[in-house]
Amino acid sequence: MLNAKIPDGPLEKKWKNYQEHCKLVNPANKKKLDVIVIGTGLSGAPAAATLGELGYNVKVFFFQDTARRAHSVAAQGGINASKNYQNDGDNVFRHFYDTLKGGDFRSREANTYRLAEISANVIDQAVAQGVPFAREYGGVLANRSFGGVQVKRTFYAQGQTGQQMLLGAYSVLMRQIGLGHVKSYNRHEMLELVVIDGKARGIIARNLITGEIERHSAHAVILASGGYGKIYYLSTLAIGSNASAAWKAHRKGAFMAGVSWVQFHPTCLPQSGDYQSKLTLMSEALRNDGRIWVPKLKGDDRFPNDIPEEERDYYLERKYPAFGNLAPRDIASRSAKEQIDAGKGVGPNKNAVYLDFKDAIKEYGAEEIGDRYGNLFRMYEKITGMSPYKQPMMISPAAHFTMGGLWVDYELMTTIQGLYAVGEANFSDHGANRLGANSLLQASVDGYFIVPVTIGNYLSNEIRTGKIPTDTPEFDKAEEDAVERLKKFISIKGTKSAEYYHKQLGKIMFHHVGVSRNKKGIEEGIKLIRELREDFWTNLKVPGGIYEVNSELEKAGRVADFLELAELMAHDAYDRDESCGAHFREEYQTEDGEALRNDDEYMYVSAWEYTGYGKTPKLHKEELTFEVVKPSVRSYK
């Protein structure tokens, strides 16, 4: 039976009640406790820095050469906070309700409310670090709207919000590293989680420069390793983004929840050829002023500026008049796919829709629009050779964010004692669909404000444990398993690269467990995934050795984990006979093509237990109860 450990009391007082009654560790005892953090994005860097500031001994591991290269750097549009600077009716409850509704009522009330409640603190923290948020003429912080809301609560640094916030987090992390409170292990990858007597006690890591296999112990481990959207190969994520740390934890007993809930971002540059390894994100902020449309005529090859207004279909404005072009991402992406599948796609490959700034430029002027989106416009022109000032952008949905992840309770602890998952690595706050600009928020809230508090409640019972030794049978076995797997990759000596298998898997996932799914397609997808996985273990080619720089060996490990995770995602999508948020089962839709939830049978979070390689996972249900909000049919019309 899953226990989310939600505190007692009214919704708005749960987090306060928790903080008032949780156990603490005094400063002298914190020096006796070790914590490992995996990842240095906007959850990992804040968690490591804050825990170091509190006095714990922290080790932080990341596979990049510098902590600044964590993928949070790529976030563009902004971060939500219910400060109500605009005096437009925003408040904590409205932020909470927008997030809960945006996720199609498939997340916990308590976690989602806490996200909104702490949001204002994150902005104050970032400003104190020097994050250069945009400001109004008078000096106050500026806001803009994002999808799924009717207020302006998004704080932004032009189109570089993730980069600027990560630099702020990086600065406080480097301060703790300089003080000796945090020890940094760059170019290291976690290969195994070590569990002793049911508790997370350390990791096996590989030095990616020397190939050396290392043992590291701790009293608690925090996974801040991001999401698994790169499983689709073509996604907005960095090429190195992977699910391996989370999957290693899953294999050791950590449940994974809502794994088929994957968000496809509606404003990305369309695929231009088979040679690409990723797609380029264009911020959702563009939908504040850009209008999305397609020609009314199928196969219309005219230059977009030559198509008159009466022959354009502004389909989001037509279908969702209350929210228009700022409809939530799952709806905007699904609507774009409908238009493309109907033969109205534009561009050389007919795989895009238009995002037009003509009216905004006419109303505000090119200079004002440039102030708002200048870096995004320049990036678009550099990539495509076309100026958004002169003709519409072409955009298309792309895999972007995973709402699913490791199951965690209210304290962000997984089903393994002492193992925490923060940020996109967990399933916690977003339900079946994430609202734009809530990603940076969740990452920051988890890292700066939640896990540094909740981890103390657990570590208070570890102060007498002493140093965790690494010469135990559990560490021996974990290292042996890790090395054996690396040797197996090299020994196959086939003819196909890990990149080949990743690309093939991405195609299978996009077509069978993508923007929309159906039972027959998922069944076919599972069959294809199994066949591909079998071929991987017989025909993979990895040159070089273990104890040297070997990027092909790194890729092989990540793709092998993707090939297992893919089947779990398909299984999760197959098992849930309803449509909710980003999980759109074509068999379950209303007469006008909207998602049709089944609250009577599926008002729960699916948490999956690993039962062995190739075996059917075991389902555990966390029933969702709503004390404050009554789930309703999600409408943006």
Image: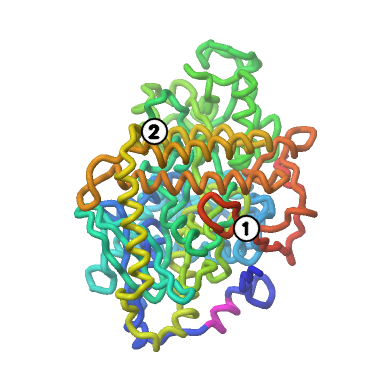
Q: 8 or 155, which is in the foreground?
A: 8
- Label 2 belongs to which residue? 500
**In front of the other: 542 or 358:** 542
| Residue for badge 1 | 618
Magenta stretch bounds: 16-22
Position in image of residue 373 (x %, y %):
43, 37
Task: Give the residue type that dot 1 points to.
Answer: Lys
**Which corner quadrant holds the N terminus?**
bottom right
Image point (60%, 29%), residue name: 337
Residue 221 can be seen, yes or no: yes
- The magenta stretch spans residue 21: yes
Closer to the camera, 305 or 17? 17
Residue at 45%, 84% (x, y): give it. 460
Principal secondary structure, stretch drawn in magenta:
helix
- In the image, residue 238 sits, relative to residue 257, either above or below, namely above
- At which x and y percent is residue 511? 57, 32
Residue at 30% from the left image edge and 40% from the top image edge: 542
Secondary structure under the numbered disc 1 in the rendered image: strand
Label 1 crowding class (10 Å Cα cut-off): few <14, some 14-19, many 20+?
Answer: few
Q: Position of residue 577 (x, y in %)?
A: 72, 45
Quick one: label 2, few (<14), some, or many (20+) residues within 10 Å?
Answer: few
The image's mark for residue 577 is none
Residue at mark 1 to residue at mark 2: CA–CA distance: 31 Å
